[in-house]
Amino acid sequence: MRILFIGDIVGKPGVEIACQAIPGYRRDESIDLVIVNGENAESGSGITPGIHKRLIRAGVDCITLGDHIYRKKDIIPTLENQSNIVKPANFPADAPGKTWTVVKSETGRKVAVFSAMGRVYMRPVDCPFTAVDRVLEEIPDDVVIRFCDFHAEATSDKQLMGRHLDGRVTAVCGTHTHVPTADEQVLPGGTAYITDVGMTGPHESILGRKIEKVLTATTTFRPLPFDVAKNDVQISGVVIEVEPKTGKATKISRIKINERQAEMLELEED
C-alpha cells in the first residue's frame, strides 16, 4: 500500500498545483490514499468549504490542519459535519472538529488519520503526547494503518513525537515550518518519520509569502500584509509504503513536483 502525504498547501498557487497534479500522480505512482495539510490553503491562512470540496474532488482522501484552522470561520460547519477533515487532537474538546477519523483507501483498507500541535513557540494547547495516546486508545483495533501529522515548530518536539509513537502508528510526518528536512527514515518499530515534509506553494518566497513584504516588515517594523507569492510553485511531500496487514511502514521517500511536471501529469490525465 502507498500513501501520499502533501505538506502545508499555501494559498491559491498551492491549491492549483495540488489539484492539477494529484489525479495523475495517483495513477502513475499507484497511490492508494492521499492526505494533505490544508491549514494555509486560503490566502495563506486558513481553509474554506470551497477549497475543502475542491481538494476532495481532486482525489484527496483526508485533510489535516494546524494553528490556522479557524482563520476562516465558515469552515466550522465542514469541520463538524465532514469525516475527511480533522482538527489537532490536543485542541479543547469543545473546539469545532474531529480529533481523528477513519478513511478508506481505493482498495477499501481503513486508515486512521489524526494530527496534533506542538507547544514550543506555538499557541498554548494541551499536551500533544497525552492527546495522541488518547486518540490511539479510541481508534478501533482493526484499524492498523494509522497516520499522524505533527504540526510543530521545534524539530526536537517532532523527533520526540516520532519516538513516542514508534511502533504504534504507521507514520509521523511533521508540518508547519514549510521547509523540508532530509531525515526521512523508518524508525526501529516500523514507523515512517520525517521532521517536516515541506510546503506546497510558491518557493520563490519566504515560507510562501512575497519576499519583499516580509523583508521590509522585518527590517523596518512597518505593518505590511504578508501576501502569498506566485513564482516557482512546487509540491513537497512524501510517499510512504506500508505493509497493510501489520500497518508497519517499509519505506518513506521525499517527493517534489514542479509546475512543468504538474502540467505533464495533467496532460496525461486528459
Image (cartoon, rainbow, N blue to C red):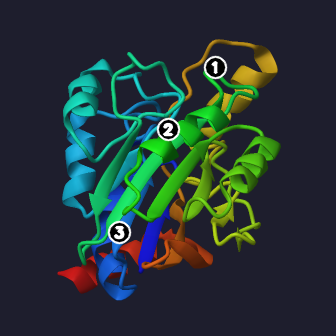
* Badge 2 amino acid: Val
In the rendered image, residue 89, in percent from the top left (x then y), is placed at 49, 34
Question: Please, is residue 178 above or below residue 261 in the view?
Answer: above
* Badge 3 amino acid: Leu
Q: Earlier in the sequence, mark 2 or mark 3?
A: 3
Label 3, residues with CA under 10 Å away: few <14, some 14-19, many ≥20: many
Residue placed under numbered mark 3 in the picture: 33
Residue at (20%, 46%) from the top-left corner?
A: 53
3D distance between C-alphas at marks 1 and 2: 23 Å
Residue at (27%, 24%) from the top-left corner?
A: 76
Residue 61 seen: no
Helix, strand or loop under label 3: strand
In the rendered image, residue 162, in percent from the top left (x then y), is placed at 70, 55
- Single out the mark in the foreground, 2 or 3: 3
Question: Please, is residue 255 above or below residue 163 in the view?
Answer: below
3D distance between C-alphas at marks 1 and 3: 31 Å
Label 1, residues with CA under 10 Å away: few <14, some 14-19, many ≥20: few
Residue placed under numbered mark 2 in the picture: 228
Q: Are the residues flagged by discs 1 and 3 in contact, CB closer than 8 Å?
A: no
In the rendered image, residue 150, in percent from the top left (x then y), is placed at 60, 45
Label at residue 123: 1
Label 2, residues with CA under 10 Å away: few <14, some 14-19, many ≥20: many
Helix, strand or loop under label 2: loop
Q: Does residue 90 appear to the left or right of 111 in the view shown?
A: right
Q: Earlier in the sequence, mark 1 or mark 2?
A: 1
Label at residue 256: none
